Image (spheres, coloured by chain):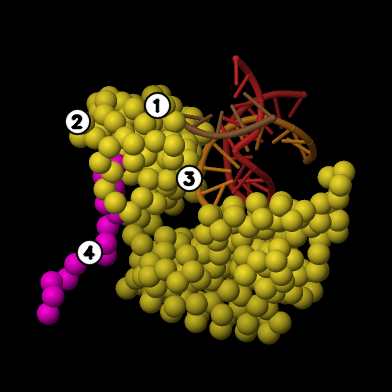
Chain colours: A yellow, B red, C orange, D brown
Amino acid sequence: MAAKRKLAENPNSELIDFLHELADYEKNVSRMIHKYNAYRKAASSIAKIDHKIQSITDIKGLEGIGKKIAAKIEQYLSTGKIKKLETNRGDETGAAINQMTRVMGIGPAHANKLVHQEKIKSIDELRSHPKRDQLLNKTQLLGLNYLEEFEQKIPRDEIKQMEIILLREITAIDNQLRAEIVGSYRRGATASSDIDVLVTHPTVAKLPSLLHKIVETLTKQFHFITDTISVGDSKFMGVCQIDTSKLHRRIDIRVFPSEQYYCALLYFTGNDQLNRHMRIVAQEQGYKLNEYSIQKVGSTGTLSKPLPVTSERDIFDYLQMD
DNA sequence: TGGACATCGCATAGGT
DNA sequence: ACCTATGCGT
DNA sequence: GTCCA
């Protein structure tokens, strides 16, 4: 039997990781979200190259790669390093800020505050800090508590088990309810980072109370939901667990009226690239497409009523796609 | 050369 | 008490 | 940081 082999890794994964690291620094430390996105875009362009980049001519002209990033890649090719990245790595404060943002609910603003004002230098220090409970809000304390668990991917088989429980209990509440797990799971991924559930019901008036009912049932009756991060009339964010032998997982549940359901299904199944592509095609065909509806765009930019959609197929048909 | 870079629900902080 | 701005995750 | 009007 042949040796077990890693699934073919990208030939430029080291360079891609470097660009992601530069991106994270801009987002978390410099608080430049657009630079973060620029680095991510460059990285995703490079991820599409299927051979090892040998020279700068291999990447010149690639989407999202301009003068500065090209120069950094040149540095990387000739020296194996990127100066800017080495400088960032030498910044202990920056490294601490980056660490803090691993906690769900701690973003760039709060991470900077914790490090600069409270002089906290690591997750461990945050965990053992005497004023921890005053420094962090409810969500952040939850994030700190589950930090290591949330960083683990969820195997497809585990999500399959969750799907059975979720669908059974949701239809038990009301047999007119329809629910699906979307995101990378619906795209067939072998592992996902969270669980994203879409729910719909034909009667619009029921929707707000519906989400609360679902959350209450899954929490109190089945102990499937273990924590609530936030919950309103249309979106729940929280934590779930199949049973105590398994890890805690991030779960979102969204409720949509039936006329919006298929646009939402399409949008939340993704991926981002397909969503962008479809929005562009929509625009070209004189439509506006988002997670709620597809509308015709008039000559003056006026929008029509949302067009009737009773399946994902309908959306593709409007756009003459297959 | 300078503005755009997606959008929005929810929690919380800050202000009146 | 109420309204608005900000942060966060998506 | 990159793109584009």
Closer to the camera in the image, A146 or A270:
A270
A267 vs A168, nearest the viewer: A267
The one nearer the camera, A315 or A54, is A54
> Residue A271 in the image: x percent, y percent?
52, 59
Instruction: Tell which circle, 1 or 4, labels the residue nearer the N-terminal end.
Output: 4
The earlier-in-sequence mark between 1 and 3 is 1
- The percent position of residue C8, horizontal first and vertical second, equals 51, 42
Range of residues picked out in magenta: A1-15
Q: What residue type is labelled 4?
A: Lys
For marks 2 and 4 on the same chain, the one whose residue lies earlier in the sequence:
4
Q: Pinpoint residue A104: horizontal percent, then vertical percent.
A: 44, 48
Mark 3 secondary-structure assignment: loop
Q: In this view, does A144 lie above or below A172?
A: above
- Same chain, marks 1 and 2? yes
Name the residue tied to disc 4. Answer: A6
Q: Which residue lies under the disc numbered 3?
A: A105
Q: Name the residue under label 2.
A: A79
For the residues labelled 1 and 4, the Cα–Cα distance comes to 33 Å
Looking at the picture, do discs 2 and 4 lie on one chain?
yes
Within the magenta stretch, is there residue A3?
A: yes
Instruction: Please say whether residue A14 is one of the residues in the magenta stretch.
Output: yes
Comparing labels 1 and 4, the label whose residue is closer to the camera: 1
Q: Tell which tag, 3 or 2, sits nearer the viewer.
A: 2
Residue A232: x %, y % from top left: 66, 57
In the image, what residue type sits under mark 1? Lys
The residue depicted at 33 percent of the width and 44 percent of the height is A16
Q: Mark 1 points at which residue?
A: A68
The answer to whether residue A213 shows anywhere in this view is no
